[in-house]
């Protein structure tokens, strides 16, 4: 596993390489040997010395002030997720060195009230996941959307499915590369926020060992928030689904996210969701009837 210094160095270097001089009002010049900004240019933009910024980029964020972190973030044109990640890395660098990995305190099962909240949403798939991308619970349409995954595990993990079950993932995601990038960026942000989560580190180690694609994407040091946007799937039963999603953190447990998927009214996706719900209800009724007959026979 990489150290905090490694993560800081790689993150800052990768963000600096991404920023073109013209993006920040500097002349590009014909003889530049680096794709992005030079260290000295970042230092000037952040109003710190070149020596001090070089120390930070070598991975040493010990004692750095919030004002300097904000200045570096502004110089590197970091978005909100990247800015939060930089501050998470700084907090980890200044934490007690004796603190070790610990098992996650994320609940293994949902409170009944949360499951009722999921079940009450019938307009589209809804589910609750943690920052490791484990699905802890879903409504009926959510379970129907990820039916193949729920058949294999009570708590399917979306990152593990994307990278280690490629037959399913390649069929389910019309743009696997984008979906995989998003999964890795969520895990990278989670690892920066809680570097001592043993379950998360175990997952990252497993994926790094078994998937060359994951290793390559993990090395990009991209991070993202997963709050709103669009999702595109190809369901094995009802076909293409073009969905909007909204996500929010639970006030009772900020490590959990509540996500809902909706379709444009009157769209083919809305029709497909109605069909998926109808088929799922029929399957569940048949399963319940089989259970009742089995109990009667017993």
Image: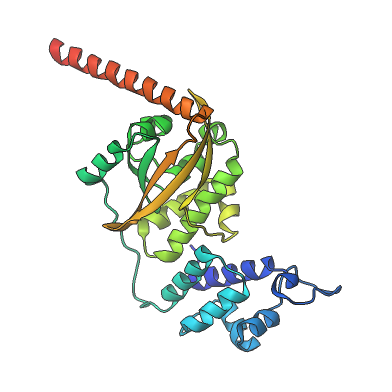
Residue at 59% from the left image edge and 68% from the top image edge: 10
Q: Residue furthest top?
A: 297
Residue 171 found in image quarter: top right
**Relative to residue 281, is residue 197 depicted above or below?**
below
Q: Can residue 149 be seen in this view?
A: yes
Q: Residue furthest front?
A: 266
Q: Can residue 58 be seen in this view?
A: no
Q: Where is residue 265 in the image (x, y as percent from the top left)?
A: 47, 33
Taking the image as shown, residue 136 lies to the left or right of residue 25, namely left
Residue at 59% from the left image edge and 77% from the top image edge: 57
| 43, 212: nearer the viewer | 43
Q: In which quarter of the image is the C terminus?
A: top left
Residue 179 found in image quarter: top right
**Relative to residue 239, is residue 13 depicted above or below?**
below
Taking the image as shown, residue 36 lies to the left or right of residue 72, namely right
Q: Where is residue 255 in the image (x, y as percent from the top left)?
A: 34, 57
**Relative to residue 296, is residue 253 depicted above or below?**
below
Q: Where is residue 186 in the image (x, y as percent from the top left)?
A: 48, 54
């Amino acid at each position: 596993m990489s150290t905090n210094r490694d993560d800081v160095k790689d993150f800052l270097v990768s963000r600096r390489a991404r920023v073109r001089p013209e993006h920040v009002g500097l002349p590009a010049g014909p003889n530049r040997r680096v794709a992005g900004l030079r260290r000295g240019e970042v230092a000037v933009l952040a109003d710190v010395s070149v020596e001090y910024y070089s120390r930070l980029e070598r991975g040493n964020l010990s004692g750095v002030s919030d004002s300097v972190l904000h200045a570096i973030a502004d110089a590197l044109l970091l978005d909100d997720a990247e800015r939060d990640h930089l501050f998470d890395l700084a907090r980890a660098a200044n934490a007690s060195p004796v603190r070790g990995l610990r098992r996650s305190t994320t609940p293994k099962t949902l409170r009944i009230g949360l499951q009722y909240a999921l079940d009450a949403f019938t307009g589209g798939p809804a589910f609750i996941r943690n920052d490791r991308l484990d699905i802890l619970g879903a409504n009926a349409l959510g379970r129907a959307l990820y039916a193949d995954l729920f058949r294999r595990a009570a708590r399917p993990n979306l990152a593990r499915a994307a990278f280690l079950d490629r037959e399913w993932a390649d069929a389910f995601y019309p743009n696997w590369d984008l979906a995989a990038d998003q999964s890795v960026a969520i895990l990278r942000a989670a690892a920066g926020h809680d570097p001592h989560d043993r379950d998360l580190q175990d997952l990252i180690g497993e994926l790094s060992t078994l998937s060359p694609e994951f290793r390559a994407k993990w090395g990009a040091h991209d991070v993202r928030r997963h709050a709103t946007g669009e999702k595109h799937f190809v369901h094995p039963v009802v076909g293409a689904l073009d969905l909007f999603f909204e996500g929010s953190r639970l006030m009772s447990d900020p490590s959990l996210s509540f996500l809902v998927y909706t379709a444009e009214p009157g769209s083919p996706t809305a029709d497909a969701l109605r069909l998926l719900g109808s088929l799922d209800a029929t399957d569940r009724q048949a399963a319940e009837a089989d259970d009742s007959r089995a109990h009667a026979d017993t």
